[in-house]
Image (cartoon, rainbow, N blue to C red):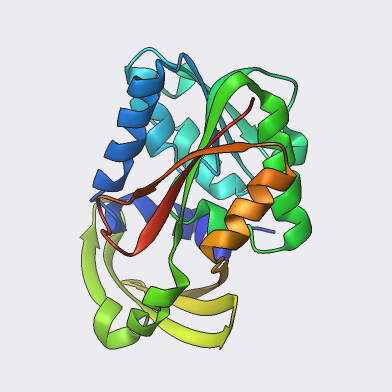
Amino acid sequence: MSDAQFSDPRLAALYDPLDTDRSDLDAYLRIAEEEGALRVLDIGCGTGVFALLLADRGVEVTGLDPARGSVDVARAKPGADRVRWIDGDITALPPLTADLATMTANVAQAIAGPADWSATLAGAHAALRPGGLLVFETRDPARRAWEEWNRPATHQVTDVPGVGVVECWTDLLDVTLPLVTFRGTFVFADGETLTSDSTLRFRERDEVEADLAAHGYVLREIRDAPDRPGREFVFLAGRP
């Protein structure tokens, strides 16, 4: 199941205006260029920001996400007809061949269940052509990012066009490593308050390396995340 923040239509519509800095995607665009990727599978495509950036560059993109609310936002954007959008998790993916598969932002960590994670790695491997590449990021647990997930550090008030003023913040609910659960609260100008609970899995580097090897990948490289230097691992894993 998807978090309400991504599946609820009213909350999904807030994702882009509340997170306007997507410079984190620059590194993924560079990797796509380095690989000469002509066909990309964007797993956890959300509101389609990355998929549409790729489509603007002439890439054939399949965007996959189980959160219908987010995919509906993506489908309504200019140029969305250039992307193949699929509602569902990796098990909903039809046969295809990709040069590159990506999981940007929190996608890999949001796939918290071991069975779902295994299925995702297997599904991406099956979709990649021989020599294709899977790229994703995950936070380094040692940096304890969750310590900053509290109201004083996350509170913001934003005037959203067509919506009005929205107040939002994050509260940490539970840390039982490797799982961390937190709640987003959104207060609308009309008085409605909506919440969304999320759980992320903080995998150790050696755990991810073992998972990749077990699913037939060859680890090509681990990079630093330019937008969070020293705080994340960016895995580049190839299909032999």
For the question of whether residue 185 can be seen, the reply is no
The residue depicted at 30 percent of the width and 39 percent of the height is: 27
Q: Quadrant of the N terminus?
A: bottom right
Left or right: residue 139 compared with residue 64: left
| Residue drawn at point x = 60 percent, y = 76 percent | 179
Name the image quarter holding residue 215: top right
Q: Quadrant of residue 229?
A: bottom left
Above or below residue 113? Residue 41 is above
Residue 215 falls left or right of residue 85: right
Where, quadrant-wise, is the C terminus in this rendering?
A: top right
The answer to whether residue 104 is seen in the rendering is yes
Using the image as rendered, state which of residue 23 and residue 163 is in the foreground.
23
Location of residue 124 by image quarter: top right
Q: Residue 166: percent from the left, percent from the top?
A: 30, 69
Residue 193 lies, with reference to residue 3, above or below; the image says: below
**Residue 42 left/right relative to 28:** right
Viewer-proximal residue among 176 and 70: 176
Residue 37: % across, % down = 44, 18
Instruction: State whether residue 40 is above or below residue 3.
Output: above
Find residue 148 and report its horizontal and vertical position in percent: 33, 81
